[in-house]
Amino acid sequence: MKRILLCAMFVMVGMAMSAQTLNYPIVQVDGKNYYSYTVEPKDGLYGISRKFGVSQADLHACNKGLESGLTIGQIILVPVVGPVAKDNPAGSFVTHEVLPKQTLYSLSRQYGVSVDELIANNPESKSGLTVGMLLKIPVKTPQVTKQTVKAAAPTSPIVTKPAPKVEKEEKAEAPKRTHVVQRKETLYSISRQYDISVEELTRANNITSIKVGQELIIPMPQKQEQTETTIEEPSIKVVENPTMAVKKGDLDLINNPQPVKPAAQNPNALRIAVLLPFMLETPYIDASVNYFWDFYRGILLGLNEVKKSGIFVDLYTFDIEKNQGTLDSVLRLPVLKTMDLIIGPAYSNQVAAVSRFSIDNRIHMVVPFTSKIELDDSHEFLLQFNPSQDVLLPLVAQTMVDRFSSSNFIIARFTGKQDKANALADEVIKALAAKRKTYRELQLSTSNVDTLKTLAGRNKTLLFLATTRLDMVSSLLPQIETLGSPALQIWGFEDWKQWVNFHEGTYYYSLFKKKDTSAYQANYKKWYGELSPINIPMYDLIGYDLINYTTAALKAKRKNMSAAFGNVECDLLQSEFKFQKVKSGTHWMNMSWSLFGYYNGKVTEIK
């Protein structure tokens, strides 16, 4: 597996990850070219806009009804950015004039060609791009049709590994080694103990997980075949002028200045590693990867503010992809043992390996995204930003029942999987039962909304809508409003977006605040261009707040940052931090959350 190390202060390419031109059918509407795109699971307007390099406003402008949300399989039109070759033979060119902050890499993504192809046709670009430079862009003829065509999903590259050699001659059988799994051991820790990879261990035992007392066969360490990609430990060097420390043919040097210079000359500088799946080896970037890039941009901008306060940081950034092999390779690097803090990983299935590395080397780590941390992976050096639902939701439910103790409760369920909405409804019922308080529960749809008027009557009533689905909410709320029940209040979710501002007396909880970010947005625009439309949460602000908070805590207590919790002073823009140990001897979980209500025409935090 290749592992890419992005040296201190890896600056973002203008990551409007445009769709590869040839991967989507193009249709013409009123003489304009559009991609015909079929909405996939987990797609959102934000992700689609980033994927194609357009704004969400552009998507709304050419697709009526998007304000009510997307549905899987829905076909939408996406404006084509840049010229489209028409009736040109394969191998022809279009001319592109370089705009501010464009790079060879961003142009290669926009036009669906490689950086090598761009350099081959524009040798002068090898030393960098300048604004106004004219480039010859090789294009192939996309099929343009005036009919709506269902778009095929972009294909991901298929990575194959060399097949193992089949020996015809019998070999003497190697001595058999076994190991009995002990408490708190993981596949990663066992593989390190015997100097083998996790892949070798799982293959030898035909397993994907282990349990205490299980006997494992320990294979002898294997030498890598020459045909396999080997991993060399790269030299760590300070990048004074913006370059990528990435040895990869289709990534170019970035010619834009960086927001903050590394501090390697300062012996007291904090050393922080970022371990995230940037997927630089993968041509197709799925929607979730965009969030990681945004998060990383926020870290860089946050470091700029951190430096002003007298805190110096050397940042080491690793692309750990989405597979265990790449992560294992990174964790073997000696330089990682010198860190003061590790930020990452993103996915729950990679937490165990990083957690074991963290406790073995007594290095603090922050898990920024997943809310699923297994008990075996929990320890005092681990910080979890996104709290577990089984810890947070009972607190939210209890707060709801206490605050609305004088109200009648109606819990509206819906067909289909409702994830945290149904889970919170279950916790509310438990809290009501503990107080011996009655409630009404019904299956709600657009066909029986009128029953709410009878159930609520004239009494003060809290209607809990156990759904986060925008399509459901957008059809129900207007009907509920026509009931004319002034004593009816609604509990919803921030996932409703603009619909939390529809009914006077709508309440919801959130991990995030709404603060003035105008100065931050201006700084973001300076380095990375236009900021995406504001949503909650903004992933770049999560990165910004986390790096500000953790560096301040490390400055106060470098070897024991948890001792500084509660006394950290720093300016945060979206999050607040209240790290607590929710169970004795386990890790630190951020338990900061707020209650919001919409009344008098605005959303207000309720103390």
Image (cartoon, helix red, strand yellow):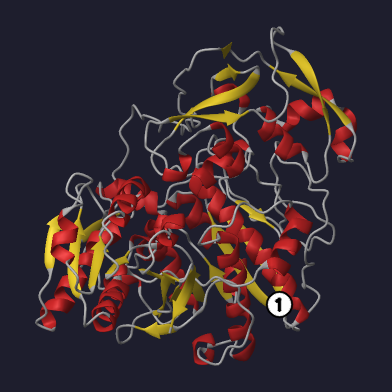
Which residue is depicted at the point 35% across and 75% down? 378
Residue 182 visible in image:
yes
| Residue 197 position in % (x across, y down) | 42, 53
Query: With respect to residue 578, does 358 lie above or below?
Result: above
Question: Dot 1: within a 10 Å radius of its alpha carbon, few (fewer than 14), some, or many (20 or more) residues?
Answer: many
The residue labelled by disc 1 is 306
Which residue is depicted at the point 41% across and 52% down? 221
Left or right relative to 558: residue 440: left
Q: Nearer the viewer, residue 540 or 58?
A: 58
| Residue 394 position in % (x across, y down) | 25, 76
| Residue 528 position in % (x across, y down) | 73, 53
Which residue is depicted at the point 33% across and 53% down? 477
Q: Quadrant of residue 139?
A: top right
Q: Quadrant of residue 307?
A: bottom right
Q: What type is the residue that disc 1 sits on?
A: Val
Q: Nearer the viewer, residue 83 or 182?
A: 83
Query: With respect to residue 369, does 155 lie above or below?
Result: above
Q: Quadrant of the C terminus?
A: bottom left
| Residue 341 position in % (x across, y down) | 57, 74
Left or right relative to 327: residue 143: right
